[in-house]
Amino acid sequence: MNFQNVKVPKVPGGGPAFALIKAGVIGAIGLYAATNSLYNVDGGHRAIMFNRIVGIKDKVFSSPPHWEN
């Protein structure tokens, strides 16, 4: 097959407004992921990791800076 003479339809780019909306959506998704990825363990306590997909994980973290079992 020869694809050199095929006409490709023009898709509207949307301009600067579309780029701004796209950047805002990507930024919001990144911010949501970052805030849900961080956790704080007070000194002398341990943290049980919970995953929304698989539930409670087997590993238990101790307080920082050791991060050992």
Image: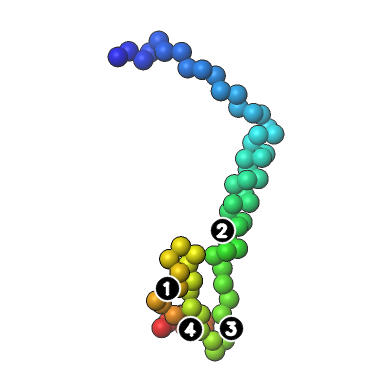
Q: Earlier in the sequence, mark 1 or mark 4?
A: 1
Q: Earlier in the sequence, mark 3 or mark 4?
A: 3
Label 1 element class:
strand
> Above or below — where is 44 with respect to 8?
below
Residue 17 placed where, x, y %?
A: 69, 34
Residue at the right extreme, as displayed: 17
Residue that label 2 marks? 33
Name the residue type under label 2. Answer: Ala
State the CA–CA distance, disc 1 to disc 4: 14 Å
Q: Which mark is residue 62?
A: 4
Label 2 element class:
helix
Residue 64 placed where, x, y %?
A: 52, 81
Count every numbered label the image shows and give the total. 4
Name the residue type under label 4. Answer: Ser
Q: Quadrant of the N terminus?
A: top left
Residue 52 placed where, x, y %?
A: 49, 64
Q: Earlier in the sequence, mark 4 or mark 2?
A: 2
Residue that label 3 marks? 42
State the CA–CA distance, disc 3 to disc 1: 19 Å
Q: Local crowd at mark 2 within 10 Å, few (<14), some, or many (≥20)?
A: few
Q: Earlier in the sequence, mark 2 or mark 1?
A: 2
Q: Are marks 3 and 4 in contact (CB under 8 Å)?
A: no
| 47 to the left or right of 27 | left
> Above or below — where is 44 with respect to 26?
below
Q: Which mark is residue 57?
A: 1
Q: Earlier in the sequence, mark 3 or mark 1?
A: 3
Residue at the bottom extreme, as displayed: 44
Q: Are marks 3 and 1 in contact (CB under 8 Å)?
A: no
Q: Is residue 46 visible?
A: yes
